[in-house]
Amino acid sequence: MLKTNLAATLALAAFVVLGVTDGALGPLWPSMRDAFGRSDGHFGQIFAALAGGYMTASVASGHLTDRFGATAVIRTGGVSAAGALWWIGIGSSWVGVLLGFLVLGLGNGLLDASINAWVAVSRSSRAMGLIHGFYGVGAVIGPILAVAFVSNGDRWGVPFLLLGSIQLIVAFVTLAAPRGFDLPIDRDDQTLSTGTADPADAGRLLALLLFWFFLYVGVEVGAGHWSFTLLTESRGVSETAGGWLVAAYWGGLTVGRFAMAWLGDRITPEVLMTQASVLGVLGALVLALDPAGAGGLALPILGLAFSVMFPVVVNRTPVYLGTRNAARFVGYQFAAASLGAITVPSLVGLLADRTSAEALGPVALVTCIVMASTWATVRALVSRRGS
């Protein structure tokens, strides 16, 4: 797992803040919507701003890392995210908030892609599970923090101000580890290719993985951000209960990732991904059908299914495609992920405006089915190559 050093600690802290931000946004949205006189369809504008910045930063992250080093890129991302969170918290206007989310996407994109690439190349799959487990810790805290402020005075801006302050502290501490993220490779869980895969196979694999990331992050973000609205405004669940159920979704994500950090070497990543894909389809089916009004209980099942997917696929990227361009390929994957974070949640919002928030269920189900099919194709191609 991650060795105990300052860089590893900063990576874990940064992922907690990323998780809190993502987990809080869904429960904060109804208050933000009402404060600015918007409709649910306008949630898509936030996704577009966030993901636009995220996509740009993700594509650039590998190239910037090659030139300036991972530590400098991570520090820049942290400072940018901190300033953006403060700006959003002030909430002077809707246009200003959207600008803040654009810059937040830039900062988070640099942080997320750079730290993931660092772990993918230099650490084991258990370490990847650990940092994403800490993301899950933050994501569990996020809805609880948000509900605490919106249910007692509708102070939706305060969580953003708090998160901005914490993010700045994390970025400042990186000054004490000037080369902490630029250390040599120290990975013992598998043999990595130091070159690149066969061009034809690499191209097909990369395309499939980009599509998978598009789908995965789209449905993970869509479920995390829209489930609160679905439960409270369509299924009659109280705000407090809805907040806890959303927290349970992120809790399932967290438990699964810590389990991966603890037991990740006892099952092959490809088999683990296949099992998680099947569980994801089952969880989405229960959420969509809402049998006996228990659809909300599918959220922790979905979270558990999703928990291992992202860290496993990121961690396998250097194995499938080689380490030489791994940082760039991971950046491209995160760009595809950010495009999915725009498309799927925005689609849910548009459908919710025309029907109801129940649109989340069928969108999540179809997306999970296509994800499972895409992963089956990846696995078949990898098996043919003998990886």
Image (cartoon, rainbow, N blue to C red):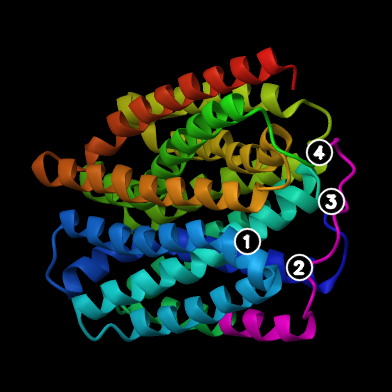
User: Could you classify mark 3 by the number of other residues whose Cα lies within 10 Å: few (under 14), some (14-19), or many (20 or more)?
Assistant: some
Residue 151 horizontal/vertical position (percent): 34, 70
Single out the mark in the foreground, 2 or 4.
Answer: 4
**N-terminal label among 1 and 4:** 1
Q: Amino acid at mark 4?
A: Leu
Q: Cα distance, mark 1 to mark 2?
A: 9 Å
Q: Amino acid at mark 2?
A: Phe
Bounds of the magenta span?
Answer: 167-192
Give the mark nearest the N terminus, 2 or 4.
2
**Can you say whether 141 is above or below 202 in the image?**
below
Does the stretch in magenta take in 5?
no
Earlier residue among tags 3 and 2: 3
Which amino acid does the dot numbered 3 rest on?
A: Met
Q: Which mark is residue 192?
A: 4
Q: CA distance from mark 3 to mark 2?
A: 15 Å
Name the image quarter holding residue 276.
top right
Identify the secondary structure beneath mark 2: loop
Mark 2, Cα crowd under 10 Å, few <14 / some 14-19 / many 20+, is many
Q: Is residue 266 left or right of residue 56?
A: right
Q: Are marks 2 and 4 in contact (CB under 8 Å)?
A: no
Which mark is drawn over residue 114? 1
Quarter placement of the C terminus:
top right
- Residue at horizontal 41 percent and vertical 24 percent from the top: 370
How far apart are the alpha carbons under marks 1 and 4?
19 Å
Give the number of the mark in front: 1 or 4.
Answer: 4
Q: Which mark is residue 1?
A: 3
Residue on which disc 2 sits: 181
